[in-house]
Image: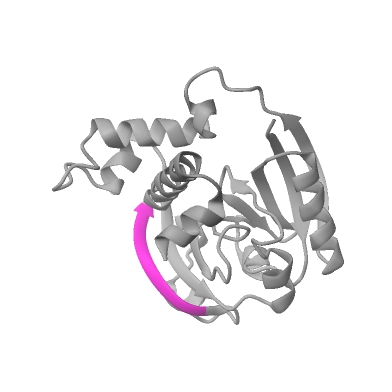
């Protein structure tokens, strides 16, 4: 049975902590692929317009390699940033060690990263915490709870409720037709989420369906090569 955990990660090596400290709001949000994609370096960052952060401000950060403005979503300025991760962060969150699904955007504050993630079980969460601590990254647990088993068809394939909702909407709107009848931007607007979050829901839902249908994850990966 899966677990939902909320926790705070603390380390001076974490990206954007110093940026959050300099903002009037003292926080920002980001979506990232750590724990899922080896060498993940792309972050989508959401900033309050009142914080008056420019593209040049972001480009001046030591960890930022490339900056691309994506516009505005849900009343926030959105940027895609390619960053240079500190070695301790890259090693601590290596996806071959453990996996966790980001349920909500990470909230970055001067105190660290506040995260809400889905884990396969308690051992998976504890493995993540132990791994982080081995690299000097503190993990403070805020809450953890067991998720009730799904009674619908999504449990057969291991989909989360949001993944199933996203896939059903995509099918209904003709996203998988050729040519496509809807874009991820349009689907995201219907679900009231960002376009990157919508793309992530679809990608992970598709991967989970393939994994369930074709066998284990390694088999799916071999087929994709």
Magenta residues, as a range? 65-72
* Residue at figure coordinates x 69%, y 36% from the top left: 4
Quadrant that contains the N terminus? top right
**On screen, 186 above or below 37?**
above
Residue 62 image point, x, y percent? 60, 82
* 39 inside magenta stretch: no
| Most foreground residue, 192 or 129 | 129
| Most foreground residue, 14 or 205 | 205
Residue 191: quadrant of the picture: top left
* Residue at figure coordinates x 74%, y 30% from the top left: 145
Horizontal side of residue 199 vs 96, given as left or right: left
Residue 207: tell me if it is visible: yes
Q: Residue furthest left?
A: 179
| Most foreground residue, 111 or 41 | 41
**On screen, 219 above or below 146?**
below
Residue 19 image point, x, y percent? 62, 68
Quadrant that contains the C terminus? bottom left
**On screen, 196 above or below 96?**
above
* Residue at figure coordinates x 24%, y 47% from the top left: 183
């Amino acid at each position: 049975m899966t677990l939902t955990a909320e926790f705070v990660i603390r380390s001076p090596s974490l990206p954007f902590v110093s940026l959050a400290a300099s903002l009037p709001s003292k926080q920002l949000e980001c979506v990232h692929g750590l724990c899922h994609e080896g060498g993940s370096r792309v972050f989508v960052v959401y900033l309050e317009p009142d914080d008056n952060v420019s593209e040049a401000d972001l480009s001046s950060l030591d960890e930022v390699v490339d900056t691309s403005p994506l516009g505005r979503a849900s009343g926030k300025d959105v940027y895609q940033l390619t960053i240079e991760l500190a070695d301790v962060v890259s090693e601590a969150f290596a996806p071959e060690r453990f996996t966790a699904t980001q349920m909500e955007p990470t909230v970055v504050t001067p105190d660290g990263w506040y995260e809400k993630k889905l884990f396969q079980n308690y051992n998976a969460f504890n493995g993540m915490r132990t791994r982080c601590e081995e690299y000097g990254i503190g993990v403070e647990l805020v809450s953890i709870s067991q998720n009730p088993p799904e009674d619908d068809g999504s449990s057969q394939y291991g989909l989360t409720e949001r993944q199933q909702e996203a896939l059903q909407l995509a099918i209904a709107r003709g996203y998988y037709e050729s040519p496509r009848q809807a874009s991820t931007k349009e689907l995201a607007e219907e679900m009231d989420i960002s376009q990157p979050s919508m793309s992530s829901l679809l990608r992970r839902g598709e991967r989970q369906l393939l994994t369930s249908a074709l066998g284990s994850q390694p088999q799916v990966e071999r087929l994709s090569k």
